[in-house]
Amino acid sequence: MNVRHFLIPVFCVALLSASPGAQQAASSKGAASITEGDLKEWLTYIASDELQGRATYSEGLGLAAGYISEHLRQWGVKPGGDSGTYLQVVKVQGVKTNSKASVTVTVNGQSRTFKDAEGITFPKQMGGKQTITGDQIAFVGYGLQVPSIELDDYRGVDPAGKMVVYLGREGPSNIPPGSFRVLSARARAAREKGAIAVIGPGNNLAGPARGAPPQPAPATPPATPPAGAGRGRGQTPVDNGDFTTVQRFDAPVTPQLAADDEFFDFLFSGSDVKYAELKAKVDKREPLPVFSLKGVKVTIDVDADYQVVRTRLTHNVVGIVEGADAKLKETYVAFGAHYDHVGFRESGNPGDDLINNGADDDGSGTVAIMSLAKAFATGPKPKRSLLFVWHAGEENGLLGSQYMADHPAVPLDKIVAQLNIDMIGRNRNDAPSAANMVLVVGSDRISTELHNINEDANAAQPTPLTLDYEMNDPADTESIYTRSDHYSYAAKGIPIIFYFTGLHPDYHRPSDSVEKIIFPKMARIARLVYTTGLTVANREKAPERDNKGPRMGKGSAGKLPIGK
């Protein structure tokens, strides 16, 4: 046993509780252990051809899991997975739905019932059985908040506890180009504002919006079927069911429904503004009014039977560094990245590079979290414990993080913050002007205090980074806030920060390779995340969850006032 290796951290823990100056020295020591050499060594393997692009259900991802796990063992990180291992099994289930759901609408005493797929459409993954009745129905026009065109359909409307209705697949004519992600996020936005149910346009305006860009191809190529499945004569294609999920599909969720003309015509039949008038405005993409529907009651009966028809397995990698404080070590600061990527192309021209190595996406985050685990495990221990998770299946729809959020390795109410890293190895669009920039997303949405901690942590760096909040804007056309693993934690009410340096021409291409990674920048961002995490882990009080939503956006900088 190397005694000195273990004595140094103990000595530093004593210093940590001694004085602010000692804490700063300990912080500097821990951050200094994050080196470009380590990051490059680890990423050279993680993004190598040997791992074949780390697709979710592949041998290559298993090799990456083993590589991370072995390093955690060497550093003395405690296993946080199943049965004393570093691996948490993630069950990905294909499910068939037998729907018996319906919606009953009463307008001025007259009632009509619409069965699922007959005027109203429930999602296949509609959740567990429940009945929701509401007589506060808020029509919110297009259901959009787009500051750049001064559009706020929620101005003066508090959707909490109400049913929210919106129209228009395309939005108004002046909506910025490329806003399809903003449009598709409207139901989710209403749910996050406290709506008890959301009803939007369905088959009457089905298909791509006129003039809108085509929907992008899925980020991940379809998984290769098991040997023999769906190939050759007499083989039956694999049945993936009506939806795929890692979450509990029998738990009640906020209903999100799509309706057609017949439903809306009856719903608005008692209103001063009738549906025909609203639809005419929608067709012309004109502004819509916002108002409450009077004399209307809606009862939603969610009722479905589910059958699991396919189960696939992948793994999260989970490690824990226990805190030094007898009481606070029962709470956690969580750090995460996804270690999967999109695999390899199965066809191409002779000599083509077919392997999507994913050096930046998210090899950079994978090894950055490794560097944090090493720094905390072999250096000064903070008061709170630390949870490190390398999520699987992010490219397939946040599978690993959703599973962790529903089947947590530690109690969710004990996680005080989650810091997520996804793509920090390059400059946005390879622009030299972005050399000092990191995009910060979500830091202010749930906890203003967490946002300010990160700002202070950056100011304390030897050379502070430029913190760019452009993609924290709710009108961000890329909807980056919802597209990485932090969102699975934010959806559970946990304060988060997402660190990201932006997309580039090699995104999801074989050319996303190690030689293009800017390791000095990567190391600086990892040190910022370390300092922010250390600060949160040493505070007596967890960051307050004031849930004020996004305030930082394009052109924003600095700290926010607390309580405003």
Image: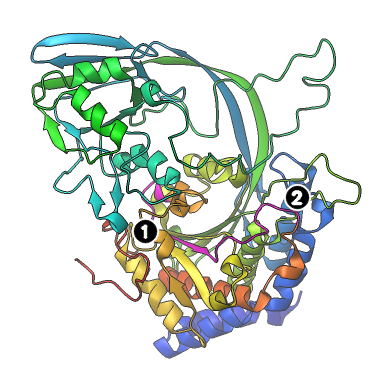
Residue sitting at 30 percent across and 18 percent down?
Answer: 261
Q: Does 307 appear in magenta?
A: no
Q: What residue is disc 2 on?
A: 53
Identity of the residue drawn at 40% across and 21% down: 203
Magenta residues? 490-510
- Rendered location of residue 196, percent (x, y): 26, 32
Residue type marked 2: Gly
Most distant residue in the front direction = 284
Where does the N terminus fall, quadrant-wise? bottom right
Q: Residue 199: which quarter of the image?
A: top left
Mark 2 Cα within 10 Å, few/some/many (few <14, many 20+)? Answer: many
Task: Say if 203 sits above or below 208 in the image.
Answer: above
> In the visual, does 497 lie left or right of 106?
right
The relative height of residue 45 versus residue 193 in the rendered view (above or below) is below
Q: Position of residue 210 (x, y in %)?
A: 43, 35
User: Could you say where residue 231 lies in the image, as x and y percent from the top left?
Assistant: 82, 20
Mark earlier in primary sequence (1, 2):
2
| Residue 473 marker | 1
Left or right of residue 50, residue 134 in this image: left
Secondary structure of the residue carrying tag 2 is loop
Badge 1 amino acid:
Asp
Residue 427: numbered disc: none
Instruction: Give left or right: position of 298 versus 330.
Output: left
Q: CA distance from mark 1 to mark 2?
A: 32 Å
Name the image quarter holding residue 291. top left
The residue positioned 37% from the left and 15% from the top of the image is 303
Q: Tell me where residue 192 appears, x and y as whole percent.
A: 31, 44
Q: Is residue 431 visible in this depiction of the protein? A: yes
Q: Quadrant of residue 452?
A: bottom left
Quadrant location of the C terminus in the rendered image? bottom left
Magenta region, main secondary structure? loop
- Residue at the image point whose x is 25% and y is 50% from the top: 151
